Amino acid sequence: MLFKKKDEINDEYETIIIGGGLAGLTAANKLAKNGRKVLLLEAHNKLGGFATWFKRAKGNHIFDVSLHGFPVGMIKTCKKYWNKDIASRIVQLKGVRFVNPMYELQSDFTVEDFKSKLTDHFKCPQEQVDTFFNELMNMNYYDAPKMTNGELLNHYFPDRNDVHRFLLEPIVYANGSTLEDPGITYGIVFSNFMSKGVFTFEGGTDLVIQMMKEELLKNGVDIKLQSKVDRIVVEETPEGNKAVGVELKGKLIKAKSVLSNGNIMSTIFKMTGEQYFKPEFIEKAKEVRLNTSSCQVYMGIKEGETLPEIGDLIFYSEAPEFKTDELLDINTSSRTFSVYYPKTRDDGRYTVVASTNARFEDWSNLTEEEYEAEKEKMIEDTLCALEKLVPGVREKIDFIDAATPTTIKKFTHHEKGSSFGTKFEGLDISMKLHKEVDGLFHSGSVGIIMSGWLGAANYGVIQSFEVENYLDQIS
């Protein structure tokens, strides 16, 4: 059932899930389908986490915040762990463009097309290309990292900054990878996309989340929105520490297990408390680095106006060469344009969302006046760039606004506004949480490779298996 804001929850559950991001939602649905009694608590007034949207009355626009593209594997995940109706609305984006001073290309983002681009356009030897792709396809997130992204690309394509840009730049936007991150954080995500290309959800984020909510309720999940958990309640027993529920507005809600879909650092240090973990675990947890964040500019096109077919996803940059530091700079000239045509929503409207990678510190340390000035500059730079793709587009826009890393922190509660969770070391901490405190589990954006729509949903599935195993053991 869907609890109202003032409803009291008196039941006891097998699992309480904190946070309604895609990992939490998918875990909840899988557990409920298996007959488990599940309560899902979400701090905001709608589900989805970073998979969200917002409406603006001026111009009557709906803007998707993170529906930019995901691998074909999302179809299988939705079909297996959600339903066929959701899976059937996942469609391919065929217009993926690269526009920068080094080259201008269009791709359907498949293995075959990328290989042909590397051999025909970039003149890389076929054997070199095949060996590179074979290594990527055999990567596994359980493997120990061997090379950084930079070392991996240099090993196969030495001194080819143009090739490095072609291969890595899209994944930097997808999960925040840099040249210094482990090669596995690039290889797995890249090869996932390469299987069949880039996909999106036809109908928009609001529709997919509504369909997911309906499926959750149909399967018996109890949901309560606007319910920020005070703390995870841990009981100290002779056998060890054990999660026994959560405290919500001062009241204990009992459960046999708790799965946090919140930030891993917040889960450990804010909601649980480091006193319940071994000192060596806490020491390692404190070393986990949060990933970078994002800025976005939202542009709504006037009713009745149209945009030419310029591509669905455009990796645009005016930087003369590829550097991941440039992609994070507050004055970057590199951004992606996600163009939402009427076919995306079937509402006759066009919207454009421009995204740039960003550092939280560059925005959080500004004064209010500096912040507003930087935000306006970002909007103007974005418009100038879009004008080069669509001359005269300014006159077609009737709504424009922007979000920064501080906006993301405010609305998602992500520490430092992290759009992609943690760096690679966060995955190990997340997966071992239940070995420290019985019945306490975590799912969400960790380790870079478990970010994005597919990564988050699949990690929810992985962790739901762990919850099931624990519930079976204690029963």
Image: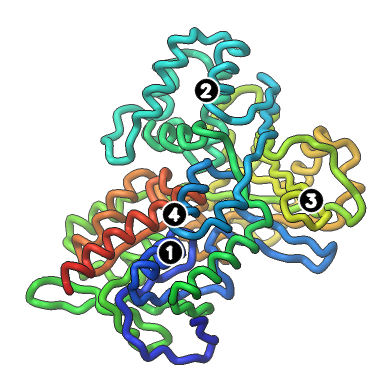
Q: Residue 428's spot in the image, x, y percent?
A: 28, 49
* Quarter placement of the C terminus: bottom left
Q: Earlier in the sequence, mark 4 or mark 3?
A: 4
Upstream in sequence: badge 4 or badge 2 = 4
Task: Label 2: state its secondary structure.
Answer: helix
Q: Give the side of residue 288 with respect to residue 453, left or right.
A: left
Residue at image location 42% in from the left, 19% down from the top: 132
Residue extending farthest to the left is 238
Looking at the rendered structure, the secondary structure element under dot 3 is helix
> Disc 2 marks which residue?
164
Residue at screen point 65% across, 61% down: 53
Q: Could you say whether the residue bearing mark 1 is in a helix, strand or loop?
A: helix
Residue density around tag 1, few if under 14, some if 14–19, many if 20 or more, within 10 Å: many
Badge nearest the viewer, 4 or 3: 4
Front one among 86 and 314: 86
Would you call the spot at circle 2 few (<14 residues within 10 Å), some (14-19), or many (20 or more)? many
Badge 1 is on which residue?
24
Q: CA distance from mark 4 to mark 3?
A: 29 Å
Kind of residue at disc 1? Gly
In which quarter of the view is residue 466 placed?
A: bottom left
For label 3, the residue is 342
Asked if marks 1 and 3 touch (Cβ < 8 Å), the reply is: no
Q: Is residue 417 visible?
A: yes
Q: CA distance from mark 2 to mark 3?
A: 34 Å
